[in-house]
Structures are given as C-alpha cells and as structure tokens.
Image (cartoon, rainbow, N blue to C red):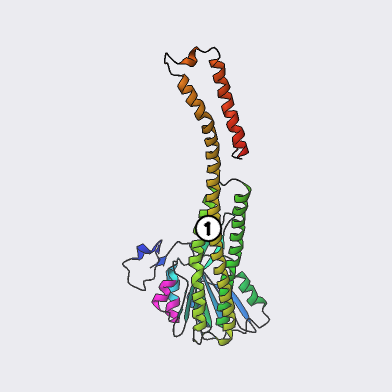
Amino acid sequence: MTDSLSNLSEKSGFPPGSLIHVGDVLESTTRMSVIDYSKENIEERQIQSVDEILKYKDSNTVTWVIIEGLANVAIVERIGALFGIHQLVLEDVLNTHQRPKFEEYDDHLYIVLKALLSQNERFTVSYEQISLLVLKNFVFLFKEKTDDLFTPVKQRIKTSKGRFRSQGADYLTYTILDTIVDQNFLLIDSLDDAITSIEDSLLASEPTRDTLHTIQMLKREIISIRRNVSPVRELMAGMLRSESELINEKTHIYLRDVSDHAIRVIESVESYRDILTGLLDIYISSVSNKMNEVMKVLTVFASIFIPLTFLAGIYGMNFEYMPELKWKWAYPALWVVFIATPLVLLIYFRRKKWL
C-alpha cells in the first residue's frame, strides 16, 4: 500500500504489520543515499533502487543507508524483504507517532526517537521522527524529510583519518544518536532565551494578554518536549543493558556519554517547566496587584462621595418643616461642608499612604 494516512484512527481495522504510512507527509518524494566506508576508502552516492544496496551486503565495510521521506512505502517493504526485518518493525518505521524506544532482535536492532528543532523567535518546535535499523555492517536511517541534521556526521566520516572509519556500525549508531540528543541543547538555549524575554517583560512593564498567551504556549511546548525527550533515558539504558553482539563493549562508554547528555536535557526541561509555573504565578500576582490598585482608587473616590451623596440626599428632600432651609447661611455652610469633607479625607488617605 502506498496511501499515506494522516492519523492513527484511519488505520483501525488493518491487521498487525500492515505497512501504511501514518502521520503528516513532510516529504512527497523519497530520496535514498548510501555512504559506504572502510578505514582506507569511502564511497557516497545517491541511489534510485533499494536493490543497488545489495552489492554492499556481503562486504566488510560499514554501509550507512539514508532514506529521506516515508511516503513511498514500497521502499521500506523492500528493505524488510532483503534484510529479513520483521513486519512489525517496518510498521513502526512508517508510524511517525512512535514513542522513543529501543528494541532488540536476533540479527538487528531497532531504535526510534524524535529530532527536535526550534523554528523561530516565538519558540515553536518542529518534530521529526528518526528510525534506525542496525545490522552487522549496515545502518538504515529513516527520516521524514530532507534536512542538514546529519551533515556534521557525514563530514566526520569524510575527514576521518581512520579512527572513525575503523569503527563498526555500532559506533556510527552512537554518532547519530549523539547528534540527535545534542541538537536538544540548541533547543534548550532557545527556550532559555524565550523564558528570559518573558521574565524581562514581566518585571519591566505591566503584564498583557500577549504575555499570558506566550507563557501558556511555552508550557504546552515544554509538555510536548518532555514527552519526547524523557523516554530517551530509558532508551539509552536499554542499549547499555543489551548483550547483543551488534553493540561492541568499547562502544558502551560512548553510549553512556549520550545517556548523560539526555539526562541533562531532561533535567533542564524539568527546571524550565518549574520556572514557567513561577512566571505564571508572577503574572497572576501582577494582575491581582493591578486590580487591587484600581479597587483602592475606586474605594477612595467612593469614600469621598458617599458622605456628600448622603448630605445631598438629605437636603434634596422636599419636607416643609426642615429648619435649615430657613437659615440665611444654610446654603454657604453646606458648600463649606461639601468642600471640607473631601479635603479632610484626602489628607487622611495621604497620611495612610493609600494614595
């Protein structure tokens, strides 16, 4: 099947192992490239058919196959047929809503995680699922779109004096994982800039609805980031516990380094979530304080005009036998009371520092 489905609900009713692309199509065409290298030689080229990979199958070199774009399901199906990959693994490759995880099989390993990238100054995050199939001398990398995420890895392979290219497929896998996890540090830096901007806004000026909207947007993004980076710690722990022959004992020290980086990212995300909660409390307090100031001013004015309204109400009544109505100085005296009352109250409020 080559039809791409936009969500999981459309896949309901299909038997397990059905190869259907689930998720947004980020790349309409599928591009394939191969980097085959050994200590002495390196070959990089674009390929049009999966069958072109067969020439590397029995060699002692390390072959990195990069598939960018998952719309063409037939390519994934053909890879599975040529290299004996279980249908459920291929199904997971095409399902772009996977939780980061590590699965171990007899002759291959399956790793899936998300690459996160901050897109603009307002800190919206794009997510790309990266799937890895690790065989004895092969690493298949499945990406949703074409980008420059792994250009540094390709450059290291090309410029290596022998150390990188003398390692096996497990070391290449470590390098790919390290690139994905370290990309999160750039995301954390962007998040730090966004939160610092909100802090400055809250402390320097009156809070606005736009500030509240930004805080809520960042909280949603952090929840999504946390959901995608937290399982990486478990993923790395699974790789370190693995007794598979595909992971050399010497590679464990590098995998532990990736695990440490993943833990640092998770801790940073947790701390920024707490900071955002504090900023939301500051926003609410600022709004409450502003409302209290308004209520204080209204209370002062009400305190001034309530006694005046009381006096006006009394002397506005049309009773015939009100003695003050016959007094010669009653009207001027009432004006004196009207003027003196607010002055006295204003002086009192000033001394109480209510104004």
Quadrant location of the C terminus?
Answer: top right
Q: Is residue 96 left or right of residue 268?
A: left
| Closer to us: 134 or 265 | 265
The reply to whether residue 68 is visible in this rendering is no
**What range is drawn magenta here?**
79-92
Look at the image and say whether residue 83 sits in the magenta stretch: yes
| Closer to us: 350 or 100 | 350
| Closer to us: 272 or 347 | 347
How many neighbours does mark 1 have within 10 angstroms: few (below 14), some (14-19), or many (20 or more)?
A: some
| Closer to us: 287 or 344 | 344
State the residue at coordinates (35%, 65%): 11
Look at the image and say whether residue 204 sits in the magenta stretch: no
x, y percent for residue 265:
57, 69
State the residue at coordinates (60%, 32%): 346
The reply to whether residue 260 is visible in this rendering is yes
Amino acid residing under circle 1: Thr
x, y percent for residue 110:
47, 77
Label 1 SS: helix
Judging by the rendered image, the residue that carries numbered circle 1 is: 277
Rendering quarter of residue 340: top right
